[in-house]
Image: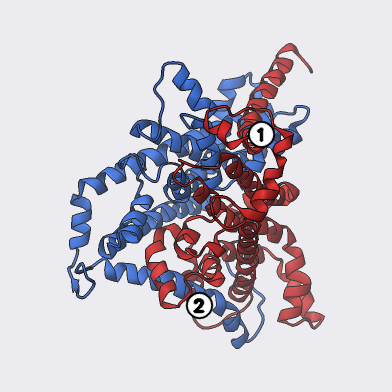
Amino acid sequence: MERRTIFPGTLLPVMLVMPQLVLTLIFFYLPAGQAILSSFTRSDPFGMHVDFVGIDNFIDLFTDPLYVDSIVRTVIFCAAVSISSMAVALILAVFADHEIAGRGIYRVLLIWPYAIAPAVAAVLWILLLHPQIGPVGRWLNQHGIHWDYKLDGFQAMLAVIFASTWKQVSYNFIFLLAGLQSIPKAVIEAARMDGAKGWFRFRTVILPLLKPTMFFLLVVNLVYAAFDTFATISAMTQGGPGKATETLVVKVYQDGYVNQDIGSSSAQSVVLMVGVIVLTALQFRFMGKRNAE
Amino acid sequence: MIGQSRNGTDWLAHGVLLLGALLFILPLWLMFAGSTQDSALISRGELSMLPNLAGLGVYADVLLHGASGGPPVWRMLLISFGMAMAVAIGKIAISVISAYAVTFFRFPLRMFCFWTIFVTLMLPVEVRIIPTFSVMADLNMVNTFPGLVVPLIASATATLLFRQTFLAIPDELMEAARMDGAGPWRFLKDILLPVSAANLAALFVILFVLGWNQYLWPLLVATDQGLTPVVLGIVQMIGTESATEWNKVMATGVLALIPPVVVVILMQRWFVKGLTEGEK
């Protein structure tokens, strides 16, 4: 789409687009380029020599069982967080769409958690789940379940999934409620007149109309779960115990920043960038199709 | 038509929504109640849901003195506030003018510029942390406030949003403005920005929260304690847990939550509208 009317001149628009362009070049293209370059190199332990090694870093990466484990772990984690936060949000949004007394207050109560930082969500969940001080953790231990997410890898995974899901519910709630509200009342009324009741009406009439919103949210949630949860995981478990909660982003941080293995971490960064670009492309193909319809 | 089933659904709706609301309020309440209690008692597992009003002094204590030898919390809050405002205002400013340039002008390489910006749309800073960090080191921006903020300002989301808004402005509006002799600046200032006020407000909320909640980038770039934002500071307070002052951690958590929550609640209507419309 283009505008018909425009302002004349070349210098002014170039000046206007320049700040954004320069920042993008310095803080996006330059680092991305550097990451791609150093993903094909390897330096000796003392940083004296840098050798070009082709795709060796990538081969090492994908033949490293630790990296493959981390991919699998990330996929499980992302799927669990995205699906459960969308499911909880959908239930809440369906009921918040009802014409009931006080629905404005309920909405505020469900929207404010949008502001919670992932790291603060982690602190809140530490307070709940901590085996010695957290009410939930203590309750579990008193009832015969040996709960210590700092020692048990599976429990650690559950803990970071809970905290990450909890923080994301309100984002999904906002979009799903808006999606529900944009469904014309006439459509729902027509379904009601045809005798479609409760769950059946929801499944056959409302859910299909929500599909575009849900697909959009799925991609956003996957990106959130893959990247924004670094803070949650870092605060709760630091990727441990062992490597039980080490997702791909945590691993890039560990290998690149803590262990200073630039070649490998650059290759990992490149893999992540490709992953995000594929997700974005999927999203736009889908949205483009929808707009064309 | 108010039948039996209708009423039944209402009760169910109240029940579910109340449960949902409590799911978020209760942990927050626990944090507040805990902040007022004695740290030693909390460590022994005696965290109570009832606040101890005599313990409210902990807020003044963390604000002025911090915890575990860390910086005072007022300083962390100041850094966070500075980051949130700088990210929000900086991003909006450069995005408005670049979107204005690509929609209301024609210049060589215009679409190339647009796509160059657009490609960065969904690449969060987390993906490119290590290389971006080395660029920051080359620019001597590690452990500086601009270093904390400027890389977060570069992203395409806001530019895309404004471009969509601007494309929807009727041509007649601009023709009328030009007929009245309005130049590009007047048009931007007197017509375009007021018309886009709802989008500006929504974006401000989103970016303020984004800036306030940053964790990984400060962790890398702000190793100097004087630059620690509160979201990072609170995690560092927990430390190794052997001697965590839990009441101070919780008080800092409450303080870290208040500003972004207030911004979201105050601007809720605009924010929800702008957020959900922007993505379509």
Quarter location, residue A88: top right
Question: What amino acid type is highlighted by mark number 2?
Answer: Val
Rendered location of residue A268, percent (x, y): 30, 57
Element class at badge 2:
helix
* Chain ID at mark 2: A
Q: Which chain is blue?
A: A
Can residue A178 be seen here? The reply is no
Give the chain coloured red: B
Task: Name the one closer to the observer, B232 or B65.
Answer: B65
Task: Say which element carries label 1.
Answer: helix
Left or right of A73 in this view: B18: right
Give the residue pinned by disc 1. B33
Callouts 1 and 2 close, C-beta under 8 Å: no
Q: Relative to residue A25, is residue B57 depicted above or below?
A: above
- In the depicted view, which residue is nearer to us: B23 or B194? B23
Q: Quadrant of residue B162?
A: bottom right
Report the residue that reaches farthest toward the right.
Answer: B180
Q: Amino acid at mark 1?
A: Ala
Q: Chain of mark 1?
A: B
- The residue at 57%/83% (across/down) is A14
